[in-house]
């Protein structure tokens, strides 16, 4: 397989492909933030949703830094990203855990990275979330599988930041079905009201209103085990290596519905396989994705149908 693509400059990032609602650009995050395109987008982005390379101890194909280099790098992106947001916009960031090299002790680097980003960008921390993947393989291997002195690390943290403490958000857009027990209470129209051990008093009226669903918690349980979806089939058909750290679509869907409205602009500065762009488009939001790897860009096109792809500056030749 031979890959050809048009050249790019920092001032004019190369648009790899476009759909009716968005565009994928082939460039680095640094070049994008220095470009005319980023200047034009200042104050227009409602949601930045992304998962940057984690500060892992072992280098990955998609690139990752560690230690003070990681903190400086992520911190340097804070102000330029903040400038892109609307005054009531949001930055949602997924960060995984990290361990000290050669030690069964967790690293505080991800937490320090969050604080560096928050302070450098003058963000408010609106809420924290946990994404639990029960199907994740046991890790770190040395401490979990071999020495058996730790349990498996099966979650990542998701941090919701904003320039304001009251960004656009509506949890009525992400209600979940009531539990069978709650449905029975609503049908029975009575509740075990009264004062709880916490001295919080609950009345029938507040708990017996059918709001169309329950308010979800800030913990997601999603088994990321898809091995035969359209994206992987497309990559296999063209002999393209799929991205090794793909975003869970349910996470993107939740935050896009929670924090944006129809036709709002969603940006993913670490586009990867472009789960963010695809889910944003499916929900009627405009989107922009940034990704430097031509291989990952070519694979990400498999998320969209031929009819959706309006134009492209990348081609694959056998």
Image (cartoon, rainbow, N blue to C red):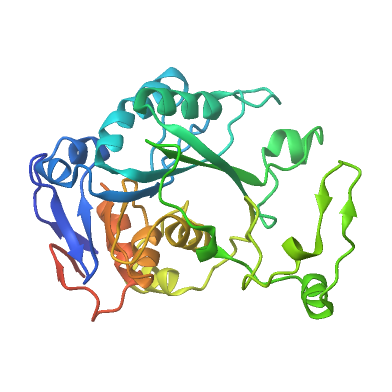
Work out whether residue 127 or residue 78 is closer to the camera in this orientation and state it: 127
From the top left corner, tell me how far across and down residue 157 is, in percent: 57, 41
Looking at the image, which residue is at 29% across and 29% down? 79
From the top left corner, tell me how far across and down residue 227 is, in percent: 54, 68
Looking at the image, which residue is at 32% across and 51% down? 46
Q: Is residue 285 left or right of residue 199?
A: left
Relative to 133, say whether 118 is above or below. Answer: above
From the top left corner, tell me how far across and down residue 212 is, in percent: 62, 73
Looking at the image, which residue is at 55% across and 27% down? 111
Residue 89 appears anywhere in the view: yes
Quadrant that contains the C terminus: bottom left
Work out whether residue 22 or residue 121 is closer to the camera in this orientation and state it: 121
Residue 86: image quadrant is top left
Q: Is residue 115 left or right of residue 316?
A: right
Residue most toward the top?
68
Residue 132 appears anywhere in the view: no
Looking at the image, which residue is at 89% across and 54% down? 194
Q: Is residue 177 left or right of residue 255?
A: right
The total number of labels drawn is 0
Quadrant that contains the N terminus: bottom left
Relative to 278, say whether 10 is above or below. Answer: above
From the top left corner, tell me how far across and down residue 27 is, in percent: 20, 45
């Amino acid at each position: 397989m031979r890959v050809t693509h048009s050249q790019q400059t920092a001032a004019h990032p190369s648009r790899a492909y476009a759909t009716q609602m968005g565009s994928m650009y082939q460039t680095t995050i640094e070049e994008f933030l220095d470009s005319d395109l980023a200047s034009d987008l200042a104050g227009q982005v409602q949601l930045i949703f992304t998962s940057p390379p984690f500060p892992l101890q072992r280098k990955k194909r998609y690139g990752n830094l560690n230690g003070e280099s990681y903190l400086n790098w992520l911190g340097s992106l804070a102000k330029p990203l903040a400038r892109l947001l609307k005054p009531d916009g949001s930055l949602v960031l997924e960060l995984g855990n990290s361990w000290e090299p050669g030690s069964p002790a967790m690293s505080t680097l991800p937490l320090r990275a969050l604080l560096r980003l928050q302070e450098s960008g003058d963000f408010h921390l609106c809420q924290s979330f946990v994404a639990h993947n029960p199907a994740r393989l046991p890790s770190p291997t040395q401490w979990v599988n071999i020495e058996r002195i730790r349990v498996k690390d099966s979650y990542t943290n998701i941090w919701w930041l904003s320039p304001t403490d009251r960004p656009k958000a509506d949890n009525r857009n992400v209600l979940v079905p009531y539990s069978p027990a709650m449905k029975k209470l609503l049908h029975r129209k009575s509740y075990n009201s009264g004062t709880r051990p916490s001295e919080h008093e609950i009345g029938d009226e507040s708990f017996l209103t059918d709001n169309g669903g329950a308010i979800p918690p800030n913990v997601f349980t999603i088994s990321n085990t898809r091995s035969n979806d359209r994206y992987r089939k497309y990559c296999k058909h063209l002999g393209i290596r799929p991205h090794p750290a793909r975003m869970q679509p349910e996470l993107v869907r939740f935050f896009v519905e929670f924090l944006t409205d129809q036709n709002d602009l969603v940006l993913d500065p670490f586009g990867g396989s472009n789960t963010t762009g695809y889910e944003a488009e499916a929900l009627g939001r405009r989107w922009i994705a940034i990704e430097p790897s031509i291989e990952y860009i070519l694979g990400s096109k498999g998320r969209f149908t031929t009819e959706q792809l309006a134009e492209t500056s990348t081609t694959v030749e056998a």
